[in-house]
Image: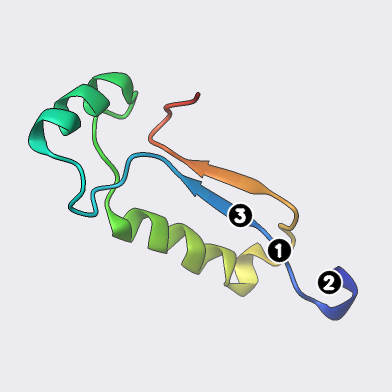
């Protein structure tokens, strides 16, 4: 798609609070996340908005892990 000016990227979110994570689950997850907090939907949305902007037009073919530093 690059020849048409289309970039293709994937955002791979980590634990994100969308009301499925109970307080007990959150405590366990936070202990494993280097940044010390669960993600919010806005965190993922901000990454996607950046990728859709002209400022990031040179980025394509990437998997962007947004997990507060947690890796599997």
Nearer to the camera, 67 or 18: 18
Element type where label 3 sits in the image: strand
| Residue 38 in the image, given as x and y percentages of width and height | 25, 39
Element type where label 2 sits in the image: loop
The part of the image, by quadrant, that contains residue 60 is bottom right
| Residue 54 in the image, given as x and y percentages of width and height | 63, 73
Q: Residue at x 17, y 52 (%)?
A: 19
* Lateral position of residue 31 relative to residue 61, left or right: left
Residue on which the image places disc 1 = 8
The answer for how far apart the CA atoms under marks 1 and 3 are is 7 Å
Residue on which the image places disc 3 = 10
Nearer to the camera, 30 or 58: 30
Residue most extreme to the bottom: 4
The answer for how far apart the CA atoms under marks 2 and 1 are is 8 Å
Which image quadrant: the N terminus? bottom right
* Lateral position of residue 18 relative to residue 52, left or right: left
Q: Which mark is residue 1?
A: 2
| Residue 56 in the image, given as x and y percentages of width and height | 64, 63
Q: Residue at x 41, y 61 (%)?
A: 46
* Lateral position of residue 12 relative to residue 61, left or right: left
């Amino acid at each position: 798609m690059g020849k048409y000016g289309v970039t293709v990227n994937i955002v791979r979110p980590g634990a994100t609070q969308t009301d499925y994570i109970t307080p007990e689950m959150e405590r366990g997850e936070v202990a494993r996340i280097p940044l010390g907090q669960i993600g919010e939907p806005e965190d993922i949305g901000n990454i996607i908005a950046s990728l859709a902007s002209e400022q990031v037009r040179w980025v394509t073919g990437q998997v962007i892990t947004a997990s507060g530093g947690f890796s599997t």
